[in-house]
Amino acid sequence: MKQEAFIVSRSQNGAEAGAPAHEPEDAGARRLSSALVLPTLNAGLGFAEWLKVLRGQTCQPDKLLLIDSSSADNTVALARQAGFEVISIRREEFSHGGTRQMALERLDSYELVIFLTQDALPASERSLERLLRWFSDPQVAAVYGRQLPRPGAGAIEAHARLFNYPDSTAVRSSADIARLGLKTVFISNSFAAWRRKALLDGGGFPDHTIQNEDSHAAARLILAGWKVVYESEATVYHSHPLSLRQEFQRYFDIGVFHARDPWIRRSFGAAEGEGLRYVKSELRFLRRANGWAIPSAFLRSGLKFIGYRLGSVERLIPRTLKKRLSGNKAYWRSAP
């Protein structure tokens, strides 16, 4: 099936993005200094093209910083040629929150910090420009962009992106908690920009979390009165064909995250309602796109549910078993 078949409207994929957004006021606004941070590990053959696309952006960051987890390929050499400052760390030193927090603390000369991942390829030459324009509003602390299915993505993989990243921009604040619940703090550091001072004043990224360091930080910012923006016109291609095992492990880790940071669910609500909306939306989507994938989708939904439930009671599970159930095995080497 062609990629175009998966580009559907919000009303078709059933996603809930948030309140309608107004265009940011950027006429005459001072340009804020920005740095781009890219964590890497063996970025591979496509990295040269990734760097070429970055160079083609209409808005160029003032600083490029690569944090590389001891790549064995030419990732570091290519990055240096492209103008990146490179920090090399051991693979076991990497953590989703701690590594990004290290970058934040190092970039004290910059007002905005952009995070991308090596597998998130800007889909438009204006992706960074559209992401950063929202910071003309002094109440905006974070902005994240739309993640589109990668070319060639299957129907299940594509729906996951189209549901979570619809085609309508939204501005979220504490006023949206009653309506959106946990979705209020949804954000992804695969492609997001943060107001550095606001983020650090709110505690920054947790230095030791299994995943979702971005949602953790967004939750603190929302509760402190800041706004978080989803900009649907700032786009990247970013999706993965997860196996059944990977789906289970991912949701086990999400369950662990919520179990270890229960204040997020207490403040914003539980995640179960969103899961039911997702399943209904996926079924409608697959009926049109690929009916043969429906049995796999039902199996995946069951594995996600079981994985999340097990993760939410991880305190009852022996550490050796938790490491086997988890997708982030490095986390359990030093987890309390």
Image (cartoon, rainbow, N blue to C red):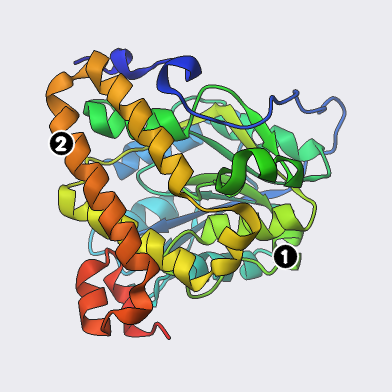
Q: Quadrant of the C terminus?
A: bottom left
Q: Residue at x 77, y 50 (%)?
A: 226
Q: Residue at x 42, y 70 (%)?
A: 95
Residue of label 2 = 296
Residue 273 location, x and y as percent? Answer: 47, 42
Which numbered disc flags the more N-terminal residue, 2 or 1? 1
Is residue 132 shown above or below 100? above
Q: Secondary structure at mark 2?
A: helix
Residue of label 1 = 202
Taking the view exactly as shown, the residue that stands out farthest to the right is 28
Seen in the image, is 52 located left or right of residue 200?
Answer: left
Q: Nearer the viewer, residue 136 or 228?
A: 228
Q: Quadrant of residue 318?
A: bottom left
Query: Label 1 amino acid?
Result: Gly
Q: Quadrant of the N terminus?
A: top left
Q: Residue at x 32, y 19 (%)?
A: 6
Q: What is the C-alpha distance between the residues marked 2 and 1?
A: 41 Å
Q: Residue at x 32, y 28 (%)?
A: 282
Residue 44 in sight in this render: no
Seen in the image, is 177 located left or right of residue 80?
Answer: right
Q: Secondary structure at mark 1?
A: loop
Neighbourhood count class around disc 2 (C-alpha, 10 Å): few under 14, some 14–19, many 20 upward = few
